[in-house]
Image: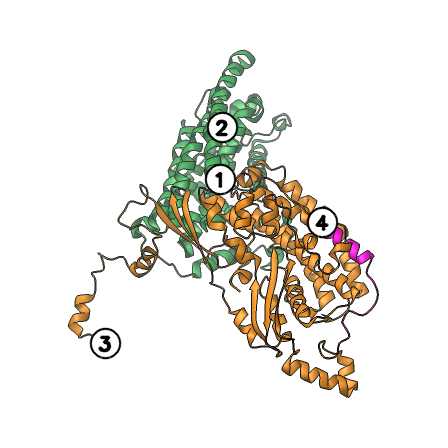
Chain colours: A green, B orange
Amino acid sequence: MVIEALIKIAIVLFVVLTGVSYTVLVERWVCAWVQDRIGPNRVGPLGLFQPLADVLKLLLKEDIEPLMAQKWFHWVAPVISIAVAFSVLAIVPFGHVLMLGNHAIPLTIASGINIGVLYIVALTSLGVYGITLAGWSSGSKYSLLGGLRSSAQMISYELTLGLGLLSVIMLSGSLDLNTIINSQAQGLWNVVRAPLGFLLFFVSSFAETNRQPFDLPEAEPELVGGYHTEYSSMKFALFFLAEYANIITASAVMTVLFFGGWHLPFVDQLGLSSLAMTIIGVLAFALKVIGLLFVFIWVRWTVPRFRYDQLMNLGWKVLLPLGILNIILTAFEKIYLIA
Amino acid sequence: MSFTEEEVILDRPAFQEVPPRQKILDALMSKDTTVSLDEDALEHEMVLNMGPQHPATHGVLRVLLRLDGETVINAECELGYLHRGYEKLAENMTYHEFIPHTDRLDYISPVANNIAYVMAVEKLLKLEIPRRAQYIRVICAELARISSHLMAMGALAMDVGALTVFVWALREREKLYDIFDVVTGVRFTVSYMRIGGMAQDLEEQGIKMIRAFLDGLPEAIGEIAAMLHKNRIFIERTASIGIMPPDEALDMGWTGPNLRGSGIPADLRRDNPYLVYNELDFDVITRQECDVLARYMVRFEEIKQSAKIVRQCIDNLPNGDVWAHDAKKVLPRKGEIYSNMEELINDFMLVNFGQAAPLGEVYSGIEAAKGELGWYLISNGTGFPWRSKIRSPSFVNLQGLARILEGSMISDIVAIIGSIDPIMGEADK
């Protein structure tokens, strides 16, 4: 059991870490495509070794700690960020059950957690500590402003995120991610059943992951880099990895909650073997995640950035009322359409 | 004065008590721009030093901000980080020798600076230049304006977060650089103009490239418009911030797109026509909103007007020489120097001793991309200016910056600076 979990951890960590570095590369390619440029193509064939070069560069950089920094918090902040980003993946089911002989292996690292949604909400809220601490402990005014922005922003959008989630919980009647996927496999995907909930969750995910148009904590033209202005070397790399890990996590969670996870419609009618079904499931999951990742990147290079007060207005005056409306709509749907 | 060892140790403050950056803090506090670090930054005002090394200050502009949360209570601009003493340098070189330096003033539209400078010198020397040269100067000045406005629009878009628009604008500027490469022989610091004409004629290849550029321009700026003009985030980020009322804009000495963005239709090309502008058909664009978006829209529309002017000039380009025939004032052609004694002597005298300008003083200004770019020259009868004063629009426009920053938020600051479009090479001279 333990060995099984360790193997799964190793595989997931490897896939996600590779995925993160290649998301960076894909982001640069998509960005170049949007901007009529060529993009990275020098390191290796098609620039495929670019992530290696990037990591190597960051590893070899001097780790500078500002004089005014609070050393311990300065050190621990990137660790919190990256740890939280990866921890969420522990409960994301990336496939159904893998049958090896008579031994069933559920394709989740921590299988059998029946409060998966709560776990996700709890951990993503922790992520703000990494950024806020980083901003505060750097001893720089720009970083401080970045940290403050992020705490206000993430707390505001957490509410909308939660309200968007509620519709999923109401529709499937469970906090367990596998149950949620199964309920979508039997009926329709939640993105169809709760489109408003998805929209709210989607927008808040952008805010939660600090991506454009909500990347105010970084806001390069204003705050020079915000909370990570004073970070260098691998500590900066950890923030960088955490940002992309967060996007992958958000895409994975969105896939599970709204796009049926590993479920593909009509595949179970083909009469394939259970192994083939599992593989198709994992591939479907990966494909959906990649599709959402592309949307994340695409949006970033298209829209400008909000201003701080506009962000707050949107969060509290538009999205929050919509979130409450969403609950009422979902309740009606649940009572009159589904039941 | 020397200290004994004991005194030095006694004078040294304990490390914990005095922050290591006390010296900088003292300097800032003596200007009443900062608050003591003892106060809690979250409860009291904070002073933020923006620049001179900041990605959004368009070079080395320094802005000191007193903040309440994210709101600016007051601001103070500090210029001079790129001061190279060009006005003084000009006094120690002949009129011709200074032309390459003008490229380095507003380095976004160098050829316009060339034109402004040589026009002032020509006015001093009472030189008439041929009509073909005047047309080519208008073409170059307008292409430089397009180049500068593209940069201004792109930079504003980048400052509010739309990096893609910036890259698209740079893509179009790249085509302009290619044109300047063919027309003038240099991409960036062109030094194209000469006193009494220009370095070389505008050839057929250059005209063809300019036509191709003008044909592609509507689509290119249409792309930018499609990205921004209906984008609610962009509109909300730029509308109703950085408001400069018309009367104050005049008081501040604003010129160019910034003044026209405040609703005053002032344009030297129309009000005081130079070169052949009075023969050309174009509109003076104004906007009444006086805010960042208005200044942006003025630039956007002016690009179209400039394209219109360039097209008219190319269609009506007269034939003839591109330099005036005045052996004592205009550099002879290279071919003639190599074959004729007279030209060789003139070249030697002009290069070494400059044009002997008549005694007197002269001011000449053109409508450059940022506003009125003028030169005030005082001649003492030698080939060197006794005084060369540059009236650079960026410097004057920046005087209004502190006023319109007050009451805005940090995110607005970058947009407002971007909308004023300062080029520090020109502001600091």
Among numbered discs 3 and 4, the one appearing first in the sequence: 3
| 3D distance between C-alphas at marks 3 and 1 | 55 Å
Q: Residue furthest front?
A: B360
Query: Which mark's residue is nearer the viewer, 2 or 4?
Result: 4
Disc 2 residue type (three-letter): Leu
Neighbour tally class for label 3: few under 14, some 14-19, many 20 plus, Cα within 10 Å: few
Q: Which range of residues does the magenta coloring cover? A: B306-326
The percent coordinates of residue B254 (x first, y second) are: 56, 52
Disc 1 residue type (three-letter): Arg
Chain ID, mark 3: B
Same chain, labels 3 and 4: yes
> Marks 2 and 4: CB-CB under 8 Å?
no
Query: Helix, strand or loop at disc 2?
Result: helix
**In the rendered image, which residue does mark 3 sit on?**
B1
The percent coordinates of residue A143 (x first, y second) are: 39, 48
Same chain, labels 1 and 2: yes
Chain ID, mark 1: A
Disc 4 residue type (three-letter): Gln
Say left or right for B345 vs A295: right
Neighbour tally class for label 2: few under 14, some 14-19, many 20 plus, Cα within 10 Å: many
Write down the quadrant of residue A284 in the picture. Answer: top right
Query: Which mark's residue is nearer the viewer, 3 or 1?
Result: 3
The disc at residue B305 is 4
Q: In this view, does A98 lie above or below B373?
A: above
Chain ID, mark 2: A
